[in-house]
Image (spheres, grey):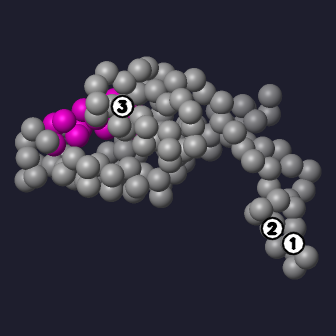
């Protein structure tokens, strides 16, 4: 399958968060009467994946629910990769803002790019909460 080969090739060249979660082949890009790409006419892309791992506590349940809401997915597991199930950098900022507002800890956005799972983020939130506000953004893990 050409799409799968292309994704595997891109994984060799790009960081994981930059690899598209799906590729759609089109005969031509839909255009508006002004010859610009008609974004509304592009086909909807669905990324199939199963929930990988069940939440073990309230924190993980909350984060799984948030990811499901942000990504329009019924099932998200604690080990699913945020970017492979359709996440993007703008949604990363929403996750980080939610964590700061709900749990009172700051987690750098770069952490979610490096460790893009609910399980890893929950562990970081627990660590930051245990250390307190002064150590919430530290990078020694």
Q: Earlier in the sequence, mark 2 or mark 1?
A: 1
Q: Image check: 55 left or right of 107?
A: right
* Rendering coords of residue 4 (x, y %): 72, 31
Q: Nearer the viewer, residue 73 or 136?
A: 73
Disc 2 + disc 1, Cβ < 8 Å: yes
Q: Which residue is mark 1?
A: 32
Is label 2 in a helix, a strand or a loop?
A: loop
Q: Main secondary structure of the magenta part?
A: helix
x, y percentage for residue 29?
A: 85, 59
Magenta part of the protein: which range? Answer: 116-128
Question: What secondary structure is found at the residue carrying circle 3?
Answer: helix
* Residue 37 disc label: 2
Quarter of the image for the N terminus: give it. top right
Residue marked by disc 3: 61
Looking at the rendered image, the disc whose residue lies closer to the viewer, 3 or 1, is 3
State the image coordinates of residue 76 (x, y, percent, origin top left). Answer: 49, 31
Q: Is residue 108 visible?
A: yes
């Amino acid at each position: 399958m050409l799409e799968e080969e292309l994704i595997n090739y891109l994984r060799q060249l790009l960081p994981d968060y930059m690899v598209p979660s799906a590729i759609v082949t089109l005969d031509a890009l839909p255009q508006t009467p002004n010859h610009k790409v008609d974004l509304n006419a592009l086909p909807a892309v669905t990324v199939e994946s199963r929930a990988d791992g069940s939440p073990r506590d309230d924190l993980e349940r909350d984060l799984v629910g948030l990811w499901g809401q942000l990504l329009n997915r019924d099932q998200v597991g604690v080990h699913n990769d945020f970017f492979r199930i359709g996440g993007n950098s703008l949604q990363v900022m929403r996750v980080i803002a939610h964590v700061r507002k709900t749990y009172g800890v700051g987690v750098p956005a770069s952490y979610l790019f490096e460790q893009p799972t609910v399980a890893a983020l929950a562990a970081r939130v627990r660590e930051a909460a245990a250390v307190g506000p002064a150590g919430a953004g530290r990078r020694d893990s």
